[in-house]
Image (spheres, helix red, strand yellow):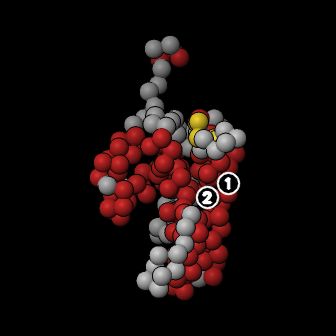
Amino acid sequence: TDDEGVLVFESGAILQYVHTQTNGKMSKADAAAVTSWITWANASLDPICFLETPDGKVYDTGLKKPNKRLAQLDQLLSKRTYLLGDNFSLADVAVASYLLYVLQFFPGVDLSPWPNMKRYMKDCASREAYGKAFGDRVQGFLLEQLGQESPKKLFGMF
């Protein structure tokens, strides 16, 4: 609950609520973009990141194979540091959270097809606020995962 006793649950709803409390400081275009990214993260990115059985149990991640939406995200991130440009926003909280959770549940996922997305994930996880929110241990683990390059096999054999 907030200071007025307003109860909000579910990550997307919480981010939307925080956004409504703070978006007066941004342009209408940026405010609309934040709303769009929060919705995209919950509706489109979540099912890519976490593959579920019909009864809702996560069994794998979709980041193990090519994905058109991730390729589009990677392309967008080739031109900017964060989703709205140079400044971290609630849009990044929504999107980076899903991406970074993948590495916690499925360590070692090969992110080499999406170098800009990998850089973005590292930038988000490197933030001081991320360490405060998730703890030094989780932050260190993720940064280690993101700093490792996939081992290359010599001629595909070694």
On screen, residue 107 versus residue 30, left or right, reads left
Residue 94: percent from left, percent from top:
54, 61
Check disc 1 and report its element: helix, strand or loop: helix
Q: Is residue 83 visible?
A: no
Residue drawn 60% across and 77% down?
Answer: 31
Q: Amino acid at mark 2?
A: Ala
Q: Provide the secondary structure element on which disc 2 rests.
A: helix
Residue 5 seen in the current view: yes
Q: Residues within 10 Å of mark 2 (few under 14, many from 20)?
A: many
Question: Mark 1 highlights which residue?
Answer: 44
Residue at coordinates 55% horizontally, 58% vertically from top-left? 95
* Label at residue 41: 2
Binning the other alpha carbons within 10 Å of mark 1 as few (below 14), some (14 to 19) or many (20 upward) gives: few
Name the amino acid, label 1. Ser
Q: Are marks 2 and 1 in contact (CB under 8 Å)?
A: yes
Gap in Å between the C-alphas at discs 2 and 1? Answer: 6 Å
